[in-house]
Image: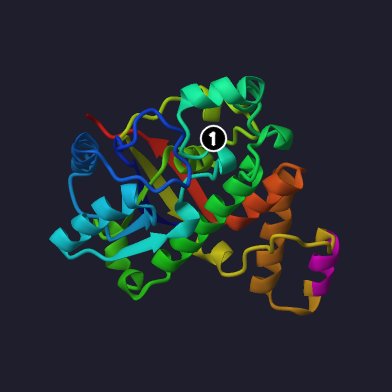
C-alpha cells in the first residue's frame, strides 16, 4: 500500500465584513494573505500539485504560489464553498433579522433539507460533490506520470495541497471521522482562517482499479457468482468489494460517498505550530 500526503488549507480573512460567504466571490484581505502564508509555511516543503477552489479568495493566492515556485495548479469549481442561495453575501445581522427561525434551524440541523436556504445547496448534495471531486483529484494524481516511478512515493512530490473553504474541509473531515450527518462538525467546530490540516492517505491501487459504481442494484452474491469463470485475481477483487460493502452504512448517500473513495484510507493529523 502506497502513501501520500494531503494538505488542506483554508483561505484567509476576506473583504466584505461579517457576511455569509458561500458562492459569493470576494477577494482576500491583506491579513488573509498573511494568514495563508503562515499556514502554508508549516508544510516545510513544496507539494507535488496544488488544487484550488476556483473562487478568488482561494484561486488568486494559489496562482501566486504556483507561479513563484513553478508548481502545477488545477482550479476546481467542485471544491468551491457550499451555495447559500438567497442568503449568500448578506450580513449575519440582516439574515437573523429577516430569517431568525430558519437561521437557528439551519445551524441546529444543517442536514435537514427543509432548513436549507431558498435556492441554496442541500448539505447532502454539497458533501457528495466534494467527495466525488476529492476522489477524482486523488485518482488523477496517483495515476499521473510523475507518480509512475515508485521513488516519488517516498519524496515530498507525493503530496497534494488543496486550497479551499471551511465547509469543504468539514465535508472531508466528516468522511474521514465517519461522523455521519452530525450537526456538530458543521455548526460547532471552528476552523480558523488560514488553518492547515494534514492527512496521510494510504492508497490501495488494486481497489482503485475497479471501484464499485455509485449505484449498483445487483446483489453482491450474484456478482461473486458471475465471477466464478474468471481468474483468481478477478475473484479477489469482487470478494474485496463484497467485504467492503458489508461494512459501510446502509444509507444510500453514505454508501455512495464511501464507494467514491474505496481504496483510500485516511489518517488525520495537525501540523506542529
Of residues 240 and 85, which is closer to you in this image? Answer: 85
In the image, residue 205 sits, relative to residue 187, either above or below, namely below
Snapshot quadrant of residue 192: top left
Q: Is the magenta stretch mostly helix, strand or loop?
A: helix
Q: Position of residue 203 (x, y in %)?
A: 46, 57
Residue 224 belongs to magenta span: yes
Image colouring: rainbow
In the picture as drawn, the residue positioned furthest to the left comes out as 68
Residue drawn at (18%, 62%), measured in percent from left and top?
67
Snapshot quadrant of residue 16: top left
Q: Mark 1 points at which residue?
A: 177
Q: Position of residue 196 (x, y in %)?
A: 31, 38
Q: Helix, strand, or loop for circle 1? A: loop
The quadrant in which the N terminus is found is: bottom left
Of residues 67 and 176, which is closer to you in this image? Answer: 67
Of residues 93 and 238, which is closer to you in this image? Answer: 93
Q: Is residue 89 left or right of residue 4?
A: right
The quadrant in which the C terminus is found is: top left
Residue drawn at (50%, 64%), measured in percent from left and top?
205
Residue 148 belongs to magenta span: no
In the image, residue 134 sits, relative to residue 272, either above or below, namely below
Q: Position of residue 148 (x, y in %)?
A: 35, 73
Q: How crowded is mark 1: few (under 14 residues within 10 Å), some or many (20 or more)?
A: few
Bounds of the magenta segment = 221-226
Residue drawn at (59%, 36%), measured in percent from left and top?
178
Q: Position of residue 138 (x, y in %)?
A: 45, 60
Amino acid at each position: 500500500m502506497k502513501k501520500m500526503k494531503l494538505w488542506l488549507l483554508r483561505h484567509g480573512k476576506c473583504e466584505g465584513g461579517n457576511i455569509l460567504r458561500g458562492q459569493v466571490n470576494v477577494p482576500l484581505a491583506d491579513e488573509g494573505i498573511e494568514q495563508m502564508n503562515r499556514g502554508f509555511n508549516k508544510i516545510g516543503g513544496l507539494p507535488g500539485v496544488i488544487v484550488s477552489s476556483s473562487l478568488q479568495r482561494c484561486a488568486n493566492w494559489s496562482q501566486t504560489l504556483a507561479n513563484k515556485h513553478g508548481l502545477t495548479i488545477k482550479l476546481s469549481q467542485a471544491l468551491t464553498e457550499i451555495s447559500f442561495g438567497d442568503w449568500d453575501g448578506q450580513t449575519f445581522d440582516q439574515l437573523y433579522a429577516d430569517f431568525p427561525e430558519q437561521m437557528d434551524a439551519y445551524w441546529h440541523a444543517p442536514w435537514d433539507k427543509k432548513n436549507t436556504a431558498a435556492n441554496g445547496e442541500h448539505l447532502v448534495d454539497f458533501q457528495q460533490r466534494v467527495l466525488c471531486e476529492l476522489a477524482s483529484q486523488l485518482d488523477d494524481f496517483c495515476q499521473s506520470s510523475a507518480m509512475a516511478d515508485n521513488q516519488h512515493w517516498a519524496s515530498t512530490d507525493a503530496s497534494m495541497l488543496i486550497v479551499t473553504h471551511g465547509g469543504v474541509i468539514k465535508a472531508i473531515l466528516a468522511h474521514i471521522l465517519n461522523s455521519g450527518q452530525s450537526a456538530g462538525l458543521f455548526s460547532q467546530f471552528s476552523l480558523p482562517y488560514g488553518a492547515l490540516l494534514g492527512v496521510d492517505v494510504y492508497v490501495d491501487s488494486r481497489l482503485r482499479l475497479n471501484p464499485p459504481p455509485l449505484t449498483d442494484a445487483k446483489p453482491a452474491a450474484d456478482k461473486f457468482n458471475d465471477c466464478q469463470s474468471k481468474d483468481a485475481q478477478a475473484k479477489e477483487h469482487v470478494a474485496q468489494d463484497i467485504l467492503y460493502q458489508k461494512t459501510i452504512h446502509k444509507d444510500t448517500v453514505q454508501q455512495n460517498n464511501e464507494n467514491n473513495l474505496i481504496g483510500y484510507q485516511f489518517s488525520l493529523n495537525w501540523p506542529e505550530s
